[in-house]
Image (cartoon, grey):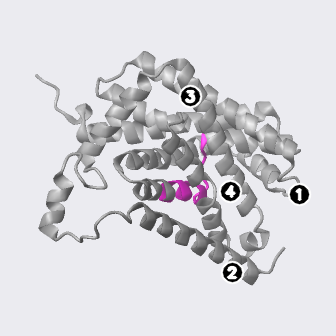
Amino acid sequence: PQPAGRGLHRALTITMSLLRALLIAAAAATSGARTVVPQPAALTRLQRLRGGNALVATPPDGFEGAVAAGSKKAAMPADKVFRLGVFSGVHIGFGALLMLTVGGACPGLAESNPGLHKLVLGAFGLPFGLMMTLLSGAELFTGNTAMVTTAVAEGKADGGQLAKSWLVSYAGNFLGSVGLAALVAAGGTLAASGAPVATAVAKTSLSFKQAFVRGILCNWLVCMAVYMASMAKDLPGKIVAIWFPISAFIALGLEHSVANMFIVPLGILSGAAVTWKAFLLKNLLPVTLGNIVGGAALVAGAYSFAYGKLGKPVPA
């Protein structure tokens, strides 16, 4: 293991380089715009514009945008949902691969500064996986538990469309994630790392209750990332909306079903003493159920109650 000082220096250097790259990207994206700092009154008027020059939608308008996006997803043909679901499974798998590659290469840091190690795990990997999914229009099951459910709650989609979106995107995500895990195992890029094996064992050692609750908390954050990203109207805004909630759920040790579709199979293929049955029943099942509760109830239901039909009085 590397000395604690070297591990800390390496993590900080990588983090600062990433932040610098994000700032450069944000500056490039806005370089053609006028650099006008609005006064408070002008800023208030700007924020009230519907579809104007504001870079972030107001909360009520953002909710309406989420409903429209969910309705569009609900109307998508099943074969297209499946294909885009495979893409998203691959995207999330690449994010998890980066997380294991970077975080798994800091054993000294994990021992000397576990808090900073968790920050490194969260910052590098899964945020970029969700970026690829959202910016390319791929279909992620966990995000659909909120977005499509919101459309159903507002009467813009029906239960059959909801079931199609959830089940077909889930199947596509599984195929994409497990397929990428097989490719990574065959390529041997993590053959010298114990991270996939250790992570697979840890995830399948949770109790049903622990995995279920961690799944709820995880998808609460993931769906907030998806929801907030849909409200941002420029690339830097979407990146920020995605980055913090996704890095947070990793740093907090929460459980994401689609990420686990890559991580645990990769561990099994790398020699972990974990069976496919244990993966499916002890991890994927409770985590999936928790993800549904987090997305459908705590994001879709909560914001429909705040801005939509669920919060309106029932006519006498």
Q: Do residues under tags 1 and 3 come within 8 Å of each other at their CB atoms?
A: no
Check residue 189 for magenta coloring. Answer: no
Q: Which residue is mark 3?
A: 169
Q: How far apart in space, not on screen, are marks 4 and 2 (Cα)?
A: 18 Å
Q: Do residues under tags 4 and 3 come within 8 Å of each other at their CB atoms?
A: no
Q: Position of residue 64 (x, y in %)?
A: 27, 38
Q: How far apart in space, not on screen, are marks 2 and 3 (Cα)?
A: 41 Å
Q: Position of residue 210 (x, y in %)?
A: 61, 45
Q: Which residues are magenta?
A: 244-257
Q: Residues within 10 Å of mark 2 (few under 14, many from 20)?
A: few
Quadrant of the rendering where the C terminus is positioned:
top left
What amino acid type is highlighted by mark number 4?
Met
In front of the other: 244 or 39: 39
Q: From the viewer's perspective, is residue 146 above or below residue 23?
A: above
Q: Position of residue 49 (x, y in %)?
A: 18, 50
Check residue 251 for magenta coloring. Answer: yes
Horizontal side of residue 124 vs 197, given as left or right: left
Q: Of the residues under marks 4 and 3, which one precedes in the sequence?
A: 4
Q: Which residue is mark 1?
A: 192
What amino acid type is highlighted by mark number 2?
His
Q: Of the residues under marks 1 and 3, which one precedes in the sequence?
A: 3
Q: Position of residue 88 (x, y in %)?
A: 59, 37
Horizontal side of residue 306 vs 89, given as left or right: left
Principal secondary structure, stretch drawn in magenta: helix
Element under label 2? helix
Q: Which residue is mark 2?
A: 9
Residue shown at 24%/46% (left/top)? 51
Q: Is residue 204 visible?
A: no
Q: Of the residues under marks 2 and 3, which one precedes in the sequence?
A: 2
Q: Which residue is mark 4?
A: 99
